């Protein structure tokens, strides 16, 4: 059983319009995804990590990670990243610990 580690979660994805797949030349078949990483303890997310991206062609299954993405796909990726926020549940763990600590501090005074 893994107690702590890093996990990935797909935050959002969309078909990049007007992007032609460099491999199979199909229009509107490239899916761009934003993946968020988080660190977890006992499967509870604690810290949000970096976001990264990948693209998949739904026609020929060609995938690219961010570093090797052709420019038009990269552009679509950054557009999507711009509107993708880190979900709050990524911070659930550290948030509940803060609450617990606050309760402990305040219980001394009441
Ligand atoms: Zn393709």
Image (tube, grey):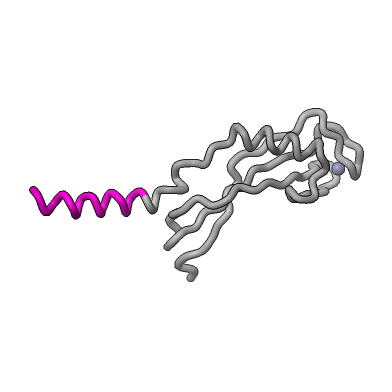
Taking the spot 73% from the left edge, 48% from the top edge, the residue there is 66
Residue 39 appears in view: yes
Picture coordinates of residue 1, whole percent (x, y): 48, 71
Quadrant of the image where one finds ligand 1? top right
From the viewer's perspective, is 29 left or right of 14?
Answer: right
Magenta highlight: main SS:
helix
The residue sitting at the top extreme is 18
The tally of labels here is 0
The residue sitting at the left extreme is 110
Q: Nearer the viewer, residue 43 or 19?
A: 19
Picture coordinates of residue 45, whole percent (x, y): 45, 54
Provide the residue span drawn in magenta: 95-110
Taking the spot 91% from the left edge, 38% from the top edge, the residue there is 25
Give yes or no for residue 101 being in the magenta stretch: yes
Taking the spot 46% from the left edge, 53% from the top edge, the residue there is 47
Taking the spot 13% from the left edge, 51% from the top edge, the residue there is 107
Q: Is residue 46 above or below residue 70?
A: below
From the viewer's perspective, is 23 left or right of 33?
Answer: right
Q: Is residue 70 above or below residue 44?
A: above
From the viewer's perspective, is 13 left or right of 58?
Answer: left
Q: Name the quadrant containing residue 3.
A: bottom left
Residue 63 appears in view: no
Picture coordinates of residue 14, whole percent (x, y): 69, 35
Q: Nearer the viewer, residue 14 or 80?
A: 80
Picture coordinates of residue 10, whole percent (x, y): 60, 46
Give yes or no for residue 83 being in the magenta stretch: no
From the viewer's perspective, is 66 left or right of 101?
Answer: right
């Amino acid at each position: 059983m893994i107690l702590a580690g890093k996990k990935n979660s797909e935050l959002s994805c969309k078909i990049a319009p007007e992007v032609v797949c460099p491999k199979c030349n199909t229009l509107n078949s490239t899916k761009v995804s934003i993946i968020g990483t988080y660190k977890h303890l006992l499967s509870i997310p604690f810290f949000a990590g970096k976001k990264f991206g990948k693209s998949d062609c739904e026609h020929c299954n060609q995938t690219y990670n961010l570093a090797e993405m052709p420019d038009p796909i990269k552009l679509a990726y950054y557009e999507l990243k711009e509107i993708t926020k880190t979900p709050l549940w990524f911070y659930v763990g550290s948030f509940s610990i803060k609450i617990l600590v606050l309760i402990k501090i305040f219980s001394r005074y009441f």
